[in-house]
Image (cartoon, rainbow, N blue to C red):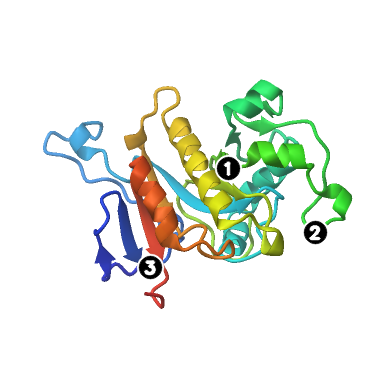
Amino acid sequence: MTQADRTNADQHIETIHGDLFQIALEPRSRPEPSNNNDLDSPSSFDSNRRRVVLLHACNTVGSWGGGIAVTFKQLFPKQYEVYREHCLGRSPGDAGPTAKGNEKEQRSGQAEGKGRVRGGRGGAEGAGPDSIPDSTHRSSLLGTCLLISPPSDTSNNNNNGNEPKRDVYIGCLFTSRAYGRSKDSPEKILASTKRALVDLTRQMNEGTARTDDWELHACRFNSGKFGVPWEHTAVIVEELGIKMTVYVPPEET
């Protein structure tokens, strides 16, 4: 990962020219022990002990078919299935990774346990129009974050020889109902982004966890296929005081 061009102009956002997915592909190294050899001491609590999250903006249709989402789908096929079934209002089954749902879904009975989705009907990505999730369910997802945990079997079985070597969470920020010509307006996307980031923060602080237990890594979400300038999204991240590392492809400025 190239880190030569690093900027800290923003208070909470650290921008790095490099590959977002490199952190998932790099093997986890053992943290250096402190002077008292206590690896549980605060001084030894580093990124190797935090929960690493890769963030990106998503539609509520259940498609990772364009832009950086294609790479997410290739590297994390099991997490994609959780996302897709979540959009369709169905349970992804007992095997594989689970997702942390939002309170609204839990109250309405659309989520079970740790965000496993149940009920509803739908079909696979690219299926006919009858397989597209209904508008009511899609509206309930908008402005929420689906936080998908690593698969329990530690293998994504993507068969492309590029297996992730670290356990990472996938953060799906639902910022637009659809994509392409049917994507939401920039104003609606930004409003949904703010709500989704608030939902992510809530989930990071659930139970005994705290915000410092998590390490957020993201692309310049919303700026690709959704067409919203990154500067507008960055303002929201700063306003909410969310710390994250944002990756810019080396060939871009």
Q: What amino acid type is highlighted by mark number 3?
A: Gly
Q: Which residue is mark 2?
A: 126
Q: Is residue 116 above or below residue 168?
A: above
Direction bottom: furthest residue: 251
Say the numbered circle drawn on residue 151: 1
Q: Nearer the viewer, mark 2 or mark 3?
A: 2
**Residue 88 at what x, y percent from top left?**
75, 42
In the rendered structure, which disc, 2 or 3, sits on the residue that comes first in sequence?
Answer: 3
Q: Is residue 221 above or below residue 82?
A: below
**Residue 148 at what x, y percent from top left?**
56, 41
Q: What amino acid type is highlighted by mark number 1?
A: Pro
Q: Residue at x 58, y 31 (%)?
A: 102
Q: Residue at x 38, y 74 (%)?
A: 250
Q: Residue at x 59, y 28 (%)?
A: 114
Q: Which residue is mark 3?
A: 18
Q: Which structural element holds mark 2?
A: loop
157 to the left or right of 132? left
Cα–Cα span, label 2 and label 3: 32 Å
Q: What amino acid type is highlighted by mark number 2?
A: Gly
Q: Which structural element holds mark 3?
A: loop
Q: Is residue 103 above or below residue 201?
A: above
In the rendered structure, which disc, 3 or 1, sits on the residue that comes first in sequence?
Answer: 3
In the picture, the quarter occupied by the C terminus is bottom left
Pointer 1 local density, CA inside 10 Å: few below 14, some 14–19, many at least 20: some
10 to the left or right of 152? left
